[in-house]
Amino acid sequence: MKITFSLLLFFLNCLTVLCQSFSEENKKDILEGLIVKGDSLKKTDRVEALYVFKKGLAIALDNELYVQSAVFYKKIGALYHREQQFIEAEKMYLAGIELDKTSKTFADLHYNMSLVKERLNQKDSALFYLEESLKFYEDYKIKNSGYKAFLRAGAVYKDRQDYEKALKYSIKAYEGFKRNNDLLKLASTCTAIGNIQSQMHNHHQALDYHNQALQLEKKLNDSLGIGVCYNNIANVYDDLKVHDSAIVNYKKAINYFKNNKRQYALLLSNIAITYNSIGERQLAEKNFKTSIETNRFLKDTTSLLYNYNGITSLYLDASNLTKAREYLDKANKLIPVITDKKAILSFYENGSEYYKKRRLYKMALQNQIKYISLYKDIYNTEQVEKVQTLQARFEKQRNENKILSLNLANKNAELQLSEKNKSIHNKNLLLVILAIVILLVVVAYQYLLQKQKSTIQTAKIGKLEAIYNGQEIIKKRIARDLHDIITTNFDGLRLRVLALKRTSNLNKSVDGITDDLKKMNQQIRMVSHRLYPLEMYMGKQKFTDIITSRLSEFQLYGNVFVELEDQLPEILNNLPIATQNNLYGILLEVLNNVEKHAHATKLNIRNYLDNNDYLNIVFEDNGMGITNKHKEGIGLMNIKQRVELMEGSCVILKTKIGTKVQLDFPIKKYL
């Protein structure tokens, strides 16, 4: 009875857990449906979308589904954000951050908080939340939101003149958008990286990224984007002082901005400045005046002052003081309403230069004093901003180092406590395991040592067998060559000597016998060279000199013109004697084949080093040529075997005019 009751309780408990699990999954499906519905409404009916998201938030909170609750807080905050209700958006984002501290939503909430803080002009807080989001995006498998955060981080760090970090995160964004094939964002990222590279004076890298952006904008058919790319490229060429290219790209950009008057006027001003820098004053004047007309129409007083300053400077350079005074007076009327200090600074600089040329030194001095005072004000302000930025960066780095040190100290303390809590039993167990491991290592070492000895012994036996077989082959070749040369030729000589008694022309017979003896001598030398061709030369002269001397001798006595196209590389003199011996033996075999079999009158030799550090040597004669039916003799076999010993390759083939022998081997391996 007790057992039956216990089983019944167990069954009821399992059923309850199963129902709870089913109910939770069912509610998650409902919440997912509300998210999909809200997302579909947020572009057409934001009020209804807000209602749907708030309904989902209430369900998630009632059922303690905190991860889903954080998602709804993010959705609601984003709707407030779009309506520019930044305080309400901030409340939603902070509430979501409190509920979920582990998922990607946590990173998204921090990123959104950084955007809100930026709009509220709280730049330090914006940077804090942005950097917190970056930590999570780098740890988790990120999607587009993470890449957008990286792109924004690049812009923020660029503004703070921290170009290394700006470039780091911009490149992360570039790789992400490229992976997702998001051409629109990829184009923006290329432009951002190009601008950062320009700030770092990496102008050629900047051009590369701006050109990438241009190609992407053309694919997207975005005329405004194309115009911006041409303008950016022109600015980089201007920095490089490549003014012709700058002008070409400014003109291309202008074609895309004729409907955008403000950008059109700016481009005209830029191209005018560039024309002035290369002495094209008429073109510069024309573009300045067109820019002035456009900015007058736009009532853009700041841009107009920059135009007046530019054209005044142009007239001052040309010593046209009347025109310079005209535009200086126009600029002077704008000064009271201008807040751009750099534009005013340029005005005072022109004024000082104008009065100096007029020899009104008192007025020139007054303008110079105003220029210096304003310059100091601008310079000091910039310096203070830079110092503040560097100070903030230093403080942040110092705080991070302190936190890192504290974390490290805490981990060390935990580790020490863990070590102290180990029991004696574990130590004894460790000693037993260590003893077993040592025993196994000793046994394995003895086994491997014995196996190595056996392998070495087998290798020695194999090497001895190879040497013996090689010696046998050499003996057979020598025996065959000597038999062919000595037995056959000497029998012929013996008969010719016996015939001397009966000959009527003794001198001619003696000359014939002498020629046969020379040929026999040459054949015996060839056998000797096949065995060790350099034995008689080494130690007396360089290897390249030996080759050159042998070629000269061959040309003289073999009646074959030898053309050495390339100088023999000095690196041949540093090869091991065995490699030199093989190379020289190949040369002798080639010369022998050219003289005896090819009946050639010319031999062309060239060499070159390829990309794999292989030395290629090519012999090409104008003789009879080799055929497919040609039986491979000892000479060709000797060539191929020597090339194999040098770990190279050899090709012997018939050409239109004769025979070509090409060999290559890894020359740097032997140095």
Image (cartoon, grey):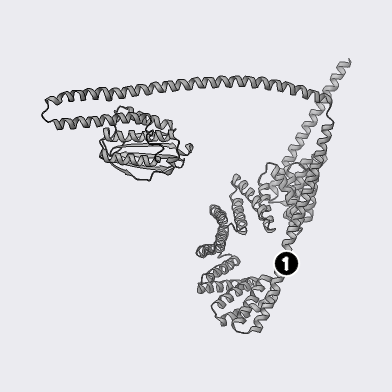
Assess disc 1: are there few (<14), some (14-19) or many (≥20) residues with their C-alpha within 10 Å of its C-alpha.
few
Single out the residue that lies furthest toward the right: 2
Viewer-nearest residue: 604 or 570: 570
Viewer-nearest residue: 233 or 493: 493
Percent x, y of residue 668:
47, 39
Horizontal side, residue 165 vs residue 211: left or right = right
Reading the image, the residue beneath label 1 is 381
Single out the residue that lies furthest toward the left: 504
- Does residue 463 sit above or below 597 in this rendering? above
Q: SS of the residue at dot 1?
A: helix
- Regarding residue 388, the answer to whether it shows in the image is yes
Viewer-nearest residue: 511 or 238: 511
Horizontal side, residue 465 vs residue 399: left or right = left
Viewer-nearest residue: 219 or 648: 648
- The three-letter code of the residue at mark 1 reads Thr
The residue at the point 43 percent across, 20 percent down is 468
Percent x, y of residue 100:
78, 43
The residue at the point 32 percent across, 40 percent down is 551
Single out the residue that lies furthest toward the top: 1
Q: Quadrant of the N terminus?
A: top right
The residue at the point 64 percent across, 49 percent down is 173
Quadrant assignment, res 256: bottom right
- Does residue 375 sit above or below 214 in this rendering? below
Percent x, y of residue 375:
69, 71
Percent x, y of residue 477:
34, 23
- Does residue 607 sit above or below 532 in this rendering? below
Horizontal side, residue 252 vs residue 414: left or right = left
